[in-house]
Image: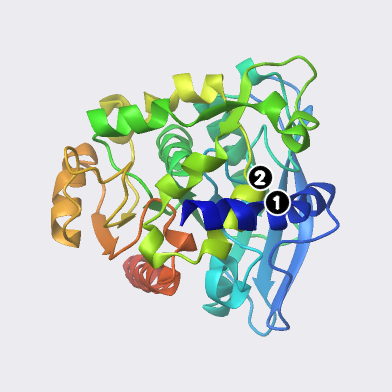
Amino acid sequence: MLHRILRAAAAVGVLSGLLATGQVTAGAAEPSTHCRNVTVPVSLSQGQPARYRIWGRFCTPVNRPATTVQVLIPGLNYSHVYWDFPFRPGHYSYVRHANSAGYATFDLDRIGLGHSSHPASSEVTLESNAHTVHQVVTALRGGAVAGRRFATVMLVGHSYGSEIAKLEAAVYRDVNALVLTGSAHAISPTTEQLLARLGQPVDQVPRLAAQVPAGDNGYVTVQDVQRPEFYNTTNADPRVIARDIATKETNTFGEIMTIGDADAPGVTQQITVPILIADGADDRLACAPDATDCSSAATLAAAERPFYPHSRVDAVVIPHAGHAINLHRNAAMAYRSIITWTKRILATRASAE
């Protein structure tokens, strides 16, 4: 299986170069969706000038106005491609599913990766990620993105993107709901051993090395041979894994060193908005057998609720899915679960106002 995946990755390697240069847009818009590429000027911390930019793909339903926008935040070594995957997008694109359900989406590249700015790696931390996402939320609420104002803004994160979403919601308190995927508090010895094996110097990947500041060794990526660790490979198309490898992105040591900051009790206790946690039953990172019990939605919710004493916490477990729930054959199950929860939560909020 791994041999087939790596051979396929080599065959589609040219795609990653096209994506990096903008010659191919991941998840090109369908007639029912209107998309445009936008940038938002950002600073890395309060009081600094907005010298950097966050790039995002802003999509809205064509035939009905959207009042809610979902800000989609990818995890480590992923870009916006994770949410709008360039292979069978009608099946693997969460963007298209959310737009079809009536929601606008802002599918971003985090600071330090993809089409967004690449500051010095030491400045790319969980805190600077949360601050830049806060500025995106402010722009969406204020009408600075494509002239549209949104009264309701949600953050939808994957893995490290979920950590960013938690910190942003706790510190800035400017969003209405959180969807956390590939996320759980407990980190097991098994997970720590897995994470220790993943790293690869970015200078070994010319496409990525060309994006980062020259001589900055604080940018790293994930080894190709380890990418299948994010999957239940029996429930994943080898062509999807191969394209995932071909479009992999970077992370920084600064992000790794601050990854746990969002789980501090002083942070999670500040979150007051509804939360959905969506994990794969076979997620080796978030749901390792010696950590979080993801055998059912009830056990996952029970494990996570104590960390969020001021929030409603719901959960969903996607069977036969690994860490990258969007990229499994049953991705549509995850999408439906997220959208169904969103509709219910927003309807409850509207009736209470």
Picture coordinates of residue 226 (x, y %)? 47, 40
Upstream in sequence: badge 2 or badge 1: 1
Taking the image as shown, residue 86 lies to the left or right of residue 182, namely: right
Which residue was labeled with disc 1? 56
Marks 2/1 in contact by CB < 8 Å: the verdict is: yes
Q: Residue reaching furthest front?
A: 3
Picture coordinates of residue 11 (x, y %)? 71, 57
Q: Distance of mark 2 from mark 1, alpha carbons?
A: 6 Å
The image quadrant that residue 284 belongs to is: top left
Secondary element under disc 2, as helix, strand or loop, is loop
Between 147 and 164, the one lying in front of the other is 164
Relative to 335, does residue 55 appear above or below in the rendering?
A: above
Q: Residues within 10 Å of mark 2 (few under 14, many from 20)?
A: many
Picture coordinates of residue 301 (x, y %)? 19, 53
Secondary element under disc 1, as helix, strand or loop, is strand
The image quadrant that residue 41 belongs to is: top right
Give me the residue at 58% from left, 66% from top: 95
Amino acid type, callout 1 = Gly
Which residue was labeled with disc 2? 109
